[in-house]
């Protein structure tokens, strides 16, 4: 796509085709699943470590903080969910072109 006016922003278009599109959606769903499982595992460890206590072992406190930070940093899952939602809400037939029949 060429710009006709300098005020128009550049657009990036990725044409994946049907197989590429399916593979991309599958990869996003796999990454979301991995993140969800990791968050569940981190939360399980946090529960086992218990609530912070005064005078608690510093290793336990350090480990709890590391897992809490990992859960907090898992914002990538939200980003992947957003991308997945946007690309799967496309109108029927969007992105697919039909070639004219040759007589």
Image: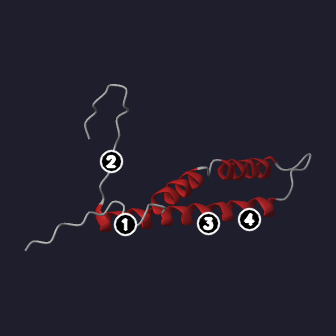
Front-lying residue, 66 or 18: 18
**Where does residue 74 sit, x and y in percent of width and height?**
62, 52
Front-lying residue, 102 or 38: 102
| Residue depicted at 37% across the width and 68% down the height | 22
Choose top left, top right, bottom left or bottom right for residue 93: bottom left
Q: Earlier in the sequence, mark 4 or mark 1?
A: 1
Q: CA distance from mark 4 to mark 3?
A: 11 Å
Location of the C terminus (image quadrant): bottom left
* Outermost residue to the bottom: 103
Circle 4/circle 3 CB separation < 8 Å = no
Q: Residues within 10 Å of mark 4 (few under 14, many from 20)?
A: few
Which mark identifies residue 13? 2
| Residue depicted at 47% across the width and 63% down the height | 88
Circle 4/circle 2 CB separation < 8 Å = no
**Where does residue 10 sit, x and y in percent of width and height?**
34, 35
Q: Earlier in the sequence, mark 3 or mark 1?
A: 1
User: Between tags 2 and 3, which lies in front?
Assistant: 2
> Relative to 75, is 16 on the left or the right?
left
User: Between tags 4 and 2, which lies in front?
Assistant: 2
Q: Secondary structure at mark 3?
A: helix
Front-lying residue, 21 or 69: 21
* Residue at image mark 4: 44
Q: Secondary structure at mark 1?
A: helix
Which mark identifies residue 37? 3
* Residue at image mark 1: 23
Q: CA distance from mark 4 to mark 1?
A: 32 Å
Q: CA distance from mark 3 to mark 1?
A: 21 Å
């Amino acid at each position: 796509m060429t710009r006709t006016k300098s005020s128009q922003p550049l657009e990036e278009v990725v044409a994946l085709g049907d197989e590429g599109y399916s593979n991309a959606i599958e990869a996003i769903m796999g990454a979301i699943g991995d993140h969800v499982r990791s968050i569940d595992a981190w939360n399980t460890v946090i529960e086992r470590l218990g609530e912070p206590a005064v005078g608690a072992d510093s290793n336990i406190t350090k480990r709890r903080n590391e897992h809490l930070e990992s859960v907090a940093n898992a914002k990538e899952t939200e980003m992947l969910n957003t991308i997945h939602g946007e690309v799967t809400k496309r109108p029927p037939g969007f992105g697919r072109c039909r070639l004219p029949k040759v007589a």
